[in-house]
Image (cartoon, rainbow, N blue to C red):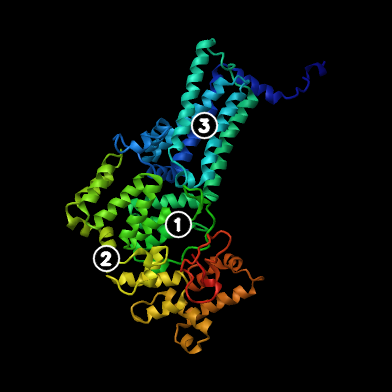
C-alpha cells in the first residue's frame, strides 16, 4: 500500500514544467522578449559603446536638402540608396536618438525574418543573429567604416533590407491567411537560444569594440572632443590606451599643444604604433594621414597646409561636414571673407549644424571676435612669419616644419621645435637648439635628453653637470633593461613601461622602433643625421 503512494521519477520533469509554463496563454507573450532584449542591447551598443564611431561617420558624410549641393550624389547610379543612407546618418548627430532608431531598424529586420521563416521558432533565431553579424562587419572595418568606404552604406543597406522585407511580408500576408507566416507560440529550445544569441552578440561585439577596436573608438572620440575643444578629456582618452595608434598620438599632441603641456606630457603615452589596417579610397594601405594631418597642421599654426590637405581630401572623397568645418576655419583665420562665407553657406544647409554656425558666423565680419577666441588666437600666434613652399619641408609638415624652424612669432613655437626633435630622437639638433635659450626651460624631458646624449658621447664632464636624480633614473632603467634576457628593445620596453613610461630616455631606447606595423617611408627625412636605429621613427 505504501508503495502505491510513491510516484515514479519522471524523466525531464524540469523541461516539462518549462514547456507547460510557455504553453500558458498569459506567458505566451514572453515570445516577444528576445526581440525586446535585442532592441535594448543594440541601443546600448550604438549609443554608449560605439557612439563616437557612429557620430564621426555622420561627420565624415554630407547631406543637405539643397539640390545643388547634393548634385554629386544625385547624379550617381545608386543615388537613392546613397541619399537615403546619408539622410539616415544625420540622426547620429545625437547618438542617443541615432542609436535608438538604428536599433529599432535592425530589430524590425530581425522580427520580419522570424515571421517569414516558419521553422517552429527557429526563424526568429536566424533573424536575431543577423543584426549582430552586421554589427560584427562594421566592427571589422574599424575606421575604414568612413575612411575607405562611402559612409552612407551604414544606413542604406539596413534601410534597403527593411523595405524589401516589409514588402515581402506584406505580400505573404495578403496571399495567406493571417498568422500563417509562422507557427504560433515559441518552442522552449528556440526561445532560449534566441535569448542567448542576443546576450552573446552584445557581449561579443562590446568586448571586441573595447579591446581590438580600442584605437578606433579613441580616435573618433578625440575627434569629437576636438570639435568641442575639450582638451583635457582628449588627453585622458589617449592616456587610457595600452598602445595608442598614430591618429590617437596626433590628437593627443594637439590637446597638449592647446593646454601648453606638450613638453611636459608628450611621453606619457606609449609610442609603438599598432597596425590599424587603414585602407584609403584608392585601395592602398595607409597610416591615416588624410584623417589627422589637416588637424595637426592647423592647430600648430600651419593654416595653409591644413587647407591644402583638407581640399585634397574633399577632391578625393567628396564633401564632408568635418572637412568643410576645417576649410571654413582656415579661411576664417586667414581673414578670407568670401571663402569663409562660401563654406559657411554650405554648413548652414546641413541639418543640425546650428551650434557651429551660431558660434562662428559672427566672426566672419568681426575680426575682433576671431582674435578674442582663445583657440583661433593661439593658432594665429603660431602661424609662420614667412611664406615658403610646402616642398621646402619634410613630411609630415607639422613635424618637418618645426624641425627646420629657426624663428617664430611666440615662445611656444620654440617649444614645438624642441618637441619635434625629441620625438624624432635627433639629440644633436635638439642640443644645438636648446643652447640658444638654455635658461628658458627646465623640463624633465630636457634633462633626460641631455643625459642620453652625454651617455652616448661618453661626455662624463657634461654628465656631471646634470641633476643626479635624473642620471640615476636613466641608469637604473638601463640596468634593469640589461637584466632582461634577449636583445629585442620593443620586448624590453613592454616590460619596463609600467615603471618608466614618461621618461624621455625610455622613449628614446625602447619606443617608436619601426617594425612590420610601420609604413615604409622612403626618404621621409624623419631619420635625422644620427646613425643609429633608435633614430628611425615615423
Residue ID for mark 3 = 37
* Residue at 58% in and 31% down: 195
Q: Quick one: 34 or 230, which is closer to the camera?
A: 230
Picture coordinates of residue 218, whole percent (x, y): 46, 52
Q: Secondary structure at mark 2?
A: helix
The quarter of the displayed image where residue 377 is located:
bottom left
Residue ID for mark 1 = 248
The quarter of the image holding the N terminus is top right
Q: Is residue 412 visible?
A: yes
Picture coordinates of residue 201, whole percent (x, y): 57, 37
Task: Categorize mark 1 by other alpha carbons within 10 Å: few (<14), some (14-19), many (20+).
Answer: many
Residue ID for mark 2 = 381
Q: Secondary structure at mark 1?
A: helix
Q: Are marks 2 and 1 in contact (CB under 8 Å)?
A: no
* Residue at 51% in and 41% down: 138
The quarter of the displayed image where residue 478 is located:
bottom right
Q: Are marks 3 and 1 in contact (CB under 8 Å)?
A: no
Q: Earlier in the sequence, mark 2 or mark 3?
A: 3
Amino acid at each position: 500500500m505504501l508503495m502505491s503512494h510513491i510516484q515514479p521519477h519522471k524523466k525531464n520533469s524540469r523541461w516539462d514544467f518549462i514547456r507547460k509554463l510557455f504553453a500558458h496563454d498569459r506567458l505566451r507573450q514572453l515570445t516577444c522578449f528576445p526581440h525586446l532584449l535585442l532592441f535594448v542591447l543594440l541601443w546600448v551598443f550604438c549609443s554608449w559603446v560605439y557612439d563616437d564611431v557612429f557620430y564621426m561617420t555622420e561627420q565624415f558624410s554630407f547631406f543637405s536638402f539643397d539640390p545643388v549641393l547634393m548634385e554629386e550624389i544625385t547624379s550617381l547610379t545608386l543615388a537613392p540608396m546613397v541619399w537615403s543612407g546619408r539622410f539616415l546618418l544625420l540622426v547620429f548627430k545625437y547618438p542617443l536618438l541615432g542609436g535608438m532608431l538604428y536599433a529599432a531598424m535592425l530589430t524590425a529586420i530581425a522580427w520580419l525574418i522570424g515571421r517569414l521563416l516558419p521553422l517552429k521558432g527557429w526563424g526568429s533565431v536566424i533573424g536575431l543573429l543577423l543584426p549582430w553579424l552586421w554589427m560584427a562587419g562594421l566592427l571589422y572595418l574599424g575606421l575604414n567604416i568612413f575612411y575607405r568606404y562611402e559612409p552612407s552604406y551604414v544606413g542604406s543597406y539596413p534601410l534597403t533590407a527593411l523595405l524589401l522585407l516589409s514588402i515581402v511580408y506584406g505580400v505573404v500576408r495578403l496571399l495567406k491567411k493571417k498568422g500563417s507566416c509562422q507557427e504560433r507560440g515559441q518552442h522552449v529550445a528556440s526561445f532560449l537560444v534566441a535569448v542567448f544569441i542576443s546576450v552573446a552578440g552584445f557581449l561579443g561585439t562590446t568586448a571586441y569594440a573595447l579591446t581590438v577596436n580600442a584605437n578606433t573608438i579613441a580616435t573618433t572620440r578625440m575627434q569629437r572632443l576636438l570639435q568641442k575643444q575639450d582638451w583635457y578629456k582628449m588627453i585622458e582618452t589617449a592616456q587610457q590606451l595600452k598602445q595608442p595608434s598614430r591618429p590617437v598620438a596626433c590628437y593627443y599632441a594637439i590637446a597638449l599643444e592647446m593646454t601648453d603641456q606638450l613638453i611636459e606630457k608628450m611621453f606619457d603615452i606609449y609610442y609603438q604604433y599598432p597596425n590599424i589596417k587603414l585602407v584609403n579610397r584608392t585601395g592602398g594601405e595607409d597610416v591615416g594621414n588624410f584623417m589627422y594631418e589637416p588637424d595637426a597642421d592647423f592647430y600648430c599654426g600651419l593654416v595653409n597646409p591644413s587647407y591644402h590637405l583638407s581640399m585634397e581630401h574633399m577632391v578625393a572623397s567628396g564633401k564632408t561636414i568635418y572637412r568643410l568645418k576645417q576649410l571654413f576655419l582656415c579661411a576664417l583665420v586667414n581673414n578670407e571673407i568670401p571663402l569663409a562665407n562660401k563654406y559657411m553657406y554650405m554648413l548652414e544647409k546641413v541639418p543640425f549644424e546650428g551650434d557651429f554656425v551660431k558660434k562662428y558666423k559672427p566672426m566672419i565680419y568681426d575680426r575682433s571676435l576671431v582674435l578674442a577666441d582663445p583657440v583661433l588666437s593661439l593658432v594665429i600666434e603660431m602661424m609662420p612669419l614667412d611664406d615658403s613652399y610646402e616642398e621646402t619641408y619634410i613630411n609630415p609638415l607639422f613635424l618637418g616644419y618645426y624641425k627646420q624652424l629657426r624663428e617664430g612669432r611666440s615662445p611656444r613655437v620654440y617649444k614645438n621645435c624642441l618637441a619635434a626633435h625629441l620625438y624624432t630622437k635627433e639629440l644633436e639638433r635638439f642640443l644645438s637648439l636648446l643652447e640658444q635659450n638654455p635658461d628658458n626651460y627646465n623640463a624633465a624631458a630636457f634633462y633626460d635628453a641631455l643625459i642620453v646624449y652625454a651617455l652616448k658621447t661618453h661626455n662624463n664632464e657634461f654628465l656631471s653637470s646634470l641633476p643626479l636624480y635624473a642620471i640615476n633614473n636613466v641608469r637604473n632603467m638601463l640596468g634593469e633593461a640589461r637584466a632582461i634576457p634577449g636583445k629585442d628593445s620593443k620586448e624590453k620596453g613592454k616590460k619596463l613601461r609600467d615603471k618608466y613610461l614618461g621618461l624621455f630616455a625610455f622613449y628614446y631606447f625602447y619606443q617608436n622602433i619601426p617594425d612590420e606595423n610601420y609604413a615604409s617611408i622612403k626618404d621621409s627625412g624623419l631619420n635625422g643625421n644620427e646613425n643609429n636605429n633608435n633614430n628611425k621613427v615615423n
